[in-house]
Image (spheres, rainbow, N blue to C red):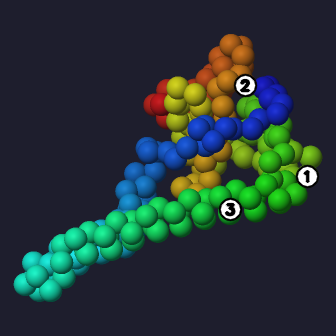
Amino acid sequence: MIILENVRPSGRELRQIWRGWGAVHWACIPHTNAFIVGFGLYGVASIEWADGLIPTGAFLMMFGLSYVVWVASGWAVRRAAAAEGSRAPTGGKPWRWTIDHAGFTFDNGLQTNRLAWGAIKSVKEDADRYVLLVTPQNNPVLPKRILDDRQHAEFRRLVDVHFGATRRG
């Protein structure tokens, strides 16, 4: 059994995952970027087909301003979500992870969650973290920095017992 106190992944450790869920990740990219790509294609087509009615400089200025607004609004949404999350009763509290042959227990004093090994698709190991692939929207992150050598070895052993070396990577 591994017991880890004060589990708080950093922003870097909570970064986006790029592998593990196949087409789900890549299917989100066009949807996320559709506005800016569509605006750009519309502008290029308008300049080409409108015989100079839309000056190139004006279009580039509108395109650049739209891009700045798009990026700024994404930043504002992330900041607002983080602020609201920190005001939640369980937001920002450190977690206690218990890992054993049955799975994981996550507890922060106000909330307890249980995750069986069978609920995990695979465990992805990065240089600084382990990512438990549970659903495309829920991927708990275990920072490696809080594990000592014995805990690393025990965790890898548990992953190999439940998944084999092919589902850790």
Q: Residue at x 92, y 46 (%)?
A: 109
Taking 45 as reference, is 11 left or right? right
- Observer-nearest of 127 and 54: 54
**Element on which disc 3 rests:** helix
Q: Residue at x 67, y 24 (%)?
A: 145
**From this viewpoint, which residue is outermost toward the right?**
109
Q: Which x, y percent locates residue 73?
A: 53, 67
Alpha carbons under labels 1 and 3: distance apart: 20 Å
Q: Residue at x 51, y 63 (%)?
A: 72
Under mark 1, the amino acid is Leu
Q: In this picture, is 78 found above or below 17?
A: below
Q: Quadrant of the N terminus?
A: top right
Residue that carries the numbered disc 2 in the rendered image: 146
Residue 53, quarter of the rendered image: bottom left
- Observer-nearest of 149 and 105: 149
**Element on which disc 1 rests:** loop
Q: Which x, y percent locates residue 76?
A: 60, 63
Q: Which x, y percent locates residue 35?
A: 37, 73
Taking 43 as reference, is 63 left or right? right
Upstream in the sequence, badge 2 or badge 1?
1
Alpha carbons under labels 2 and 3: distance apart: 26 Å
Under mark 2, the amino acid is Ile
Q: Which x, y percent locates residue 45?
A: 15, 78
Query: Would you say the residues marked 2 and 1 are in contact, meaning their CB atoms lie under 8 Å apart?
Result: no
Q: Residue at x 37, y 56 (%)?
A: 26
Under mark 3, the amino acid is Ala
Nearer mark to the viewer, of 1 and 3:
3
Residue that carries the numbered disc 1 in the rendered image: 110
Residue that carries the numbered disc 3 in the rendered image: 81
